[in-house]
């Protein structure tokens, strides 16, 4: 049963991943090929090999069909409503604010079951309420800096609504009222924590406990990710395991029967999953913990591989698009590394003792998670193994203290608990910021070739394991694959060090120009509205220094948003009188016509509302004027970049990228 469950889950994962990233004809082709291979395998193979291959192919076939049908019934039918005005009714599952709220609703959308996001202003809405309204449906669209489909699709949201009218709200009652109160308490915790321990520390503790990482300062979040412990911000199996262990310990002291302990544990874990925002990693841990508790009741040996396989199948049946959720894949990879890979590797190398097993666990998890990380994150930490061994235990202590404080209703009498947790959080932040400032502790994943290389090397490691059946050789192969990946990325970064790149981001109203060379950059924001896009770009490119940000219009109102970027600019220039007061080390200057900024051997001149980028004998003009400049230019209008570069006209929507020079 153990291997069958794992093989079935693997086949299901492959089938659904292919379905959701391939065209309809490609899905049909996969179904046909899987069916042929399944039948051929039954006749051509025998014994254990036949059983293994047949199981994987059968579930690949089943879930390919299931994914294709489900995609049509949900995604295609909902997106087909784009442009239509329909009636929407359902339960508010998430609400950003009680007055001007971005609301997530689960219910009926024009006669189709699904989820939708919509802004409902002044409706006094909270989670758990039932709402009904008429609105226009629109399909989710990606921009140059935000992949809306990748973000919302795994959450089961495929469309958004706008121009909502005739809104009716029925306040939550019964179980929905409890749901709303739990979510409301969750939203208040950040403020409570911050009042006791400070802003950054409170937000970090709240993020670890509740999964509210969106409120965490981008600089702190970047430092945690670069240090390799960013996974603590995603409510994971660690949280659920801690809760289950605490409940089991207390009930055991009271000599409560196993069946009653199971029921109480399930209820408390379910409440925590709701409290955590239904994070997919928490749901995964809840299902696995349920299987573990059931095994003890029926007196069956718990098997981690079977449990993980069954959990994957349950979650994919309930929500097929979970397969595209980075948190889901990272959670699976992490559990696979801890529960399956680590015991096998420790046995193969004769590793014993708690400290040795802990170190080996960190290594195995890192190697298993990295192939997924290159698709989910913009950077790979090179010190993750060390930081997880050293810092994670302290973070666990802070998490437990925060959990006890919150579970008791945040009473002032227990404030020393949260204050101790705050001290731990403060030192964790400082250590991570120090690690992040070192620069060599992480590498950016900004090259399209890197994921392809990682996939190829991962496949090679699997083939080594299958061919040799040696865990030791497979382990050495995995370490070698990691070393090759790091070497390739370092070589790419070194080769690209002296190249000057122009990156244009435009959403239809203005633009952001980022000129990069090495690890530094200069940004030109046409109207000050692109600070969020700039923060995304910094993380994506792994930039370590921002020489200057120039805001061409309305700078006074928007310059402060750049001060909260993960890398604070050395200087900000804007078009009105610059204030001499600032809470940061960033210099503030008045932008004048003819201002020249330098980056390496590149010069950016700001004149007449245009940006002239010059390097050597090459020059490019970035303009929003109706008549493009002579020579090389990038003309930006309504989110479309018309580029005349080296005699070739190119048109790109939502931005473009150009290499002006290289080594």
Image: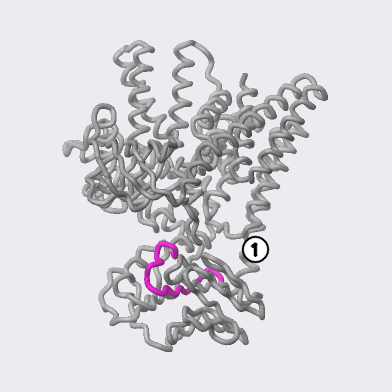
What segment is highlighted magenta in the picture? 518-534
Residue 436 at x, y percent in the picture = 46, 58
Residue 525 is a magenta residue: yes
| Scheme of image coloration | one colour
Residue 410 at x, y percent in the picture = 21, 37
Dot 1 corresponds to which residue? 492
Residue under the point 58% across and 75% down = 643
Residue 180 at x, y percent in the picture = 27, 36
Residue 400 is a magenta residue: no
Image: 534 above or below 323: below
Which is nearer the eye, 538 or 301?
Answer: 538
Q: Is residue 205 visible?
A: no
Left or right? Give the position of 255 relative to 59. Answer: left
Image: 104 above or below 248: below
Image: 538 above or below 482: below
Q: Circle 1 sits in a helix, a strand or a loop, which is it?
A: helix
Q: Quadrant of residue 518?
A: bottom right
Query: In the current view of this chain or complex, which residue is farthest to the right?
Result: 44
Residue under the point 41% across and 75% down = 526
Residue under the point 62% across and 87% down = 617
Q: Quadrant of residue 577?
A: bottom left
Residue under the point 50% across and 56% down = 142
User: Callout 1: few (<14), some (14-19), or many (20+) C-alpha neighbours within 10 Å?
Assistant: some
Quadrant where the C terminus lies?
Answer: bottom right
Left or right? Give the position of 79 relative to 127. Answer: right
Quadrant where the N terminus lies?
Answer: top right
């Amino acid at each position: 049963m153990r291997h069958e469950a794992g093989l079935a889950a693997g086949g299901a994962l492959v089938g659904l991943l292919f379905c959701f990233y391939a065209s309809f004809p490609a899905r049909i082709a996969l179904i046909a090929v899987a069916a042929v291979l399944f039948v051929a395998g039954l006749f051509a193979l025998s014994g254990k090999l036949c059983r293994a291959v047949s199981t994987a192919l059968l579930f690949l076939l089943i879930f390919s069909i299931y994914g294709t049908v489900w995609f049509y019934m949900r995604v295609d039918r909902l997106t087909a409503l784009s442009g239509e005005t329909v009636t929407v009714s359902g339960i508010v599952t998430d609400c950003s604010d009680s007055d001007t709220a971005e609301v997530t609703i689960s219910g009926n959308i024009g006669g189709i079951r699904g989820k939708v996001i919509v802004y409902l202003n002044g409706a006094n809405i909270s989670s758990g309420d039932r709402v009904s309204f008429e609105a226009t449906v629109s399909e989710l669209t990606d921009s140059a800096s935000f992949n809306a489909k990748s973000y919302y699709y795994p959450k089961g949201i495929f469309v958004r609504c706008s121009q909502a009218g005739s809104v009716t709200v029925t306040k939550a009652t019964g179980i929905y009222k409890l749901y709303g109160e739990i979510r409301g308490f969750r939203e208040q915790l950040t403020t409570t924590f911050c009042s006791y321990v400070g802003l950054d520390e409170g937000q970090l503790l709240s993020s670890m406990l509740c999964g509210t990482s969106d409120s965490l300062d981008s600089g702190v979040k970047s430092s945690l990710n670069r240090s390799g412990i960013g996974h603590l911000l995603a409510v994971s199996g660690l949280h659920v395991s801690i809760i289950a262990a605490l409940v089991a310990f207390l009930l055991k002291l009271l000599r409560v029967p196993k069946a009653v302990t199971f029921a109480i544990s399930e209820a408390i874990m379910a409440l925590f999953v709701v409290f955590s925002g239904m994070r997919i990693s928490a749901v995964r841990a809840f299902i696995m913990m349920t299987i573990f508790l059931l095994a003890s009741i029926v007196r069956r040996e718990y098997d981690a591989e079977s449990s993980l396989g069954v959990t994957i199948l349950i979650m994919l049946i309930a929500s097929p698009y979970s397969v595209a959720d980075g948190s889901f894949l990272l959670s699976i990879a992490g559990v696979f590394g801890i529960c399956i890979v680590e015991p096998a590797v420790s046995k193969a190398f004769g590793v014993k003792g708690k400290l040795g097993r802990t170190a080996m666990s960190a290594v195995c998890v890192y190697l298993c998670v990295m192939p997924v990380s290159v698709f989910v994150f913009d950077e790979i930490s090179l010190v993750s193994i060390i930081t997880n061994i050293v810092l994670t235990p302290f973070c666990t202590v802070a998490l437990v203290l925060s959990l006890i404080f919150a579970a008791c209703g945040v009473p002032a009498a227990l404030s020393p608990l949260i204050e101790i947790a705050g001290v731990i959080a403060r030192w964790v932040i400082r250590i991570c910021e120090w690690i992040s400032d070192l620069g060599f502790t992480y590498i950016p994943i900004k090259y399209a070739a890197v994921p392809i290389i990682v996939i190829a090397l991962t496949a090679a490691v699997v083939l080594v394991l299958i061919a040799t059946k040696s865990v030791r050789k497979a382990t050495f192969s995995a370490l070698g694959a990691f070393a090759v990946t790091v070497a390739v990325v370092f070589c790419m970064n070194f080769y690209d060090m002296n190249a000057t790149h122009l990156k244009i981001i435009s959403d239809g109203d203005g633009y952001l120009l980022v000129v990069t060379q090495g690890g530094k950059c200069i940004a030109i924001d046409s109207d000050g509205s692109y600070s969020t896009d700039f923060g995304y770009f910094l993380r994506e490119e792994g930039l370590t220094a921002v020489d200057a940000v120039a805001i061409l219009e309305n700078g006074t109102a928007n310059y402060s948003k750049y001060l909260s970027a993960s890398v604070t600019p050395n200087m900000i220039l804007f078009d009105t009188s610059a204030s001499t007061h600032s809470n940061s080390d960033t210099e503030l200057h008045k932008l004048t016509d003819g201002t020249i900024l330098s980056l390496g051997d590149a010069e950016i001149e700001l004149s007449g509302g245009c940006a002239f980028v010059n390097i050597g004998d090459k020059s490019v003009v970035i303009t929003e004027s109706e008549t493009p400049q002579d020579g090389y230019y990038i003309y930006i209008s309504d989110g479309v970049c018309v580029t005349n570069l080296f005699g070739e006209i190119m048109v790109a929507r939502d931005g473009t990228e150009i290499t002006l020079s290289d080594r």
